[in-house]
Image: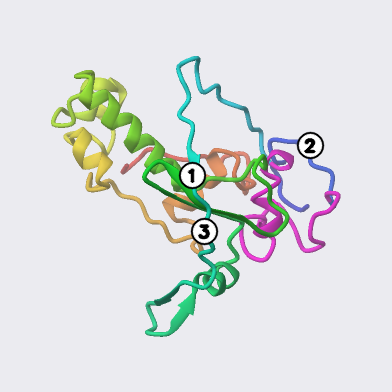
Amino acid sequence: MTDIIKPPLAVQWPLPGAPATLSWTNWDWPPQNRWAFQHVGDLLRVARISRGYGPAWHFGSAPRDMSGITFTDADGRTRTVADMLTATNTDGFLVAQDGKIVAEIYLNGMERSTLHLSQSVVKSFTSTLVGILVGAGELDITRLVSDYIPELASSGYRGATVSQVLDMRSGVKFSEDYLAPDSEVAALDRACGWKPRRDSADTLSTKGL
């Protein structure tokens, strides 16, 4: 590694079982991510979060073979579910209907118990929890986010409502150009340890946000 700032874990390269091309700067890009997304704990500091002590929902099972189901993709081609899973390098695929799991498929060495990077799926988890809080009268999405997090009053989120933030309509300056090293998403990746910093002063600035 040539980066001045080391990653948050004392990673010894190469990692056992990892692709030979894997590095701290490309682990989340294909084809390296096919291995890395199932081994994030070897790269980043991770922690298990307790689900709590409330009752758990148990899904029933009504398995059916969905691999041959056809659909028309965005390019107008007829494809099967099996084709789609292969073409998109899917690791896990689950379909639930009426409280029952009708399809549960794991690929690329993944198993039911495998820890896998969730990426933006966490947005769905967050929205579900917000819905519960709204239903319980604990959260008002028409109020300003700064009413709940006062520190945001001096940021780019000043004046934005909870609803606008949930809908990603806050207007905050944020470029999600992953190929631009000076974009906000690149700075965020470096600030949170997702990617190595370029130098000791390379931190995420809140100026303009």
Image location (x, y in percent) of residue 192: 55, 38
Label annotation for residue 10: 2
Q: Is residue 38 magenta?
A: yes
Badge 2 element: loop
What residue range appears in magenta? 15-43
The residue carrying mark 3 is 64
Compared with 76, 18 (above or below) is above
Badge 1 element: helix
Compared with 147, 59 (above or below) is below
Q: Which circle's residue, 3 or 1, is located before the other in the chain?
A: 3
Image location (x, y in percent) of residue 88: 55, 68
Disc 3 to disc 2, C-alpha distance: 45 Å
Q: State left or right for residue 25 relative to residue 151.
A: right
Q: Which circle's residue, 3 or 2, is located before the other in the chain?
A: 2
Q: Amino acid at mark 1?
A: Leu
Q: Amino acid at mark 3?
A: Arg
Question: Are circles 3 and 1 on residues that touch, CB within 8 Å?
Answer: no
Disc 2 to disc 1, C-alpha distance: 21 Å
Q: Is residue 163 magenta?
A: no
The residue carrying mark 1 is 188
Disc 3 to disc 1, C-alpha distance: 42 Å
Q: Main secondary structure of the magenta part?
A: loop
Question: Are circles 3 and 2 on residues that touch, CB within 8 Å?
Answer: no
Badge 3 element: loop
